[in-house]
Image (cartoon, rainbow, N blue to C red):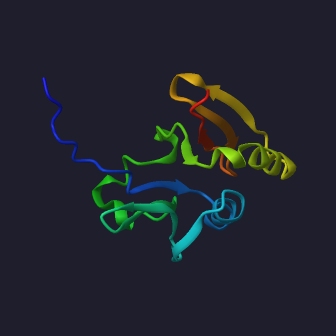
């Protein structure tokens, strides 16, 4: 049986709601190293990488109390009900050890794990609000 054409070509955007927009912007800009694309009073958009069809891959943070964009869904999307597991960002293999050392030097608790079944070295660390962030690097020799 042949596979149908895949319509999804990449991740365009991931967004989370945050309690302290300024602290979270600083973390994702200065610690994670994302470029700010747009900042408003109630949100910040970061560029992750080039995307598909002219749209960059983005990560956004929205102030938790800003519900205008949610319209009728605001009562369903409260932080206590979040199902977020973690946010993962690709990094080059040659930067893996240096990034781990840099993050630990900033006082972050970093856990490194190898996922041999997908040839990935991963490191996990928390953001200021307790979301789990992952840096991962592909290693074909793993």
Q: Quadrant of residue 74?
A: bottom left
Q: Is residue 40 visible?
A: yes
Left or right of residue 36: residue 13: left
Q: Position of residue 71 (x, y in %)?
A: 30, 61
Left or right of residue 70: residue 16: right
Left or right of residue 119: residue 78: left
- Locate the N terminus and report the quarter of the image it occupies: top left
Most foreground residue, 85 or 78: 85
Q: Position of residue 50 (x, y in %)?
A: 44, 63
Most foreground residue, 9 or 138: 138
Residue drawn at the location 77% of the way across and 43% of the way down:
97
Left or right of residue 83: residue 112: right
The residue sitting at the front extreme is: 141
In the rendered picture of this protein, how many numbered marks are placed on residues? 0
Q: Is residue 131 above or below residue 24?
A: above
Q: Quadrant of residue 22?
A: bottom right
Q: Position of residue 107 (x, y in %)?
A: 85, 48
Q: Is residue 57 visible?
A: no
Q: Position of residue 129 (x, y in %)?
A: 65, 49
Residue drawn at the location 51% of the way across and 65% of the way down:
47
- Locate the C terminus and report the quarter of the image it occupies: top right
The residue sitting at the left extreme is: 1
Residue drawn at the location 46% of the way across and 48% of the way down:
78
Most foreground residue, 98 or 88: 98
């Amino acid at each position: 049986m042949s596979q149908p054409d895949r319509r999804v070509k990449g991740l365009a955007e991931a967004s989370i709601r945050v309690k302290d927009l300024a602290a979270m912007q600083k973390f994702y800009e200065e610690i994670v190293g994302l470029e700010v694309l747009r900042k408003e009073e109630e949100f910040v958009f970061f560029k992750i990488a080039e995307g598909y069809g002219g749209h960059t891959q983005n990560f956004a943070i929205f102030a938790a109390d800003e519900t205008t964009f949610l319209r009728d869904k605001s009562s369903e999307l409260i932080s206590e009900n979040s199902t977020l597991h973690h946010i993962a960002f690709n990094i080059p293999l040659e930067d893996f050890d240096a990034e781990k050392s840099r993050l630990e030097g900033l006082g972050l608790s970093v856990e490194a794990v190898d996922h041999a079944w997908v040839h990935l070295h991963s490191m996990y660390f928390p953001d200021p609000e307790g979301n789990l962030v992952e840096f991962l690097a592909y290693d074909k020799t793993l």
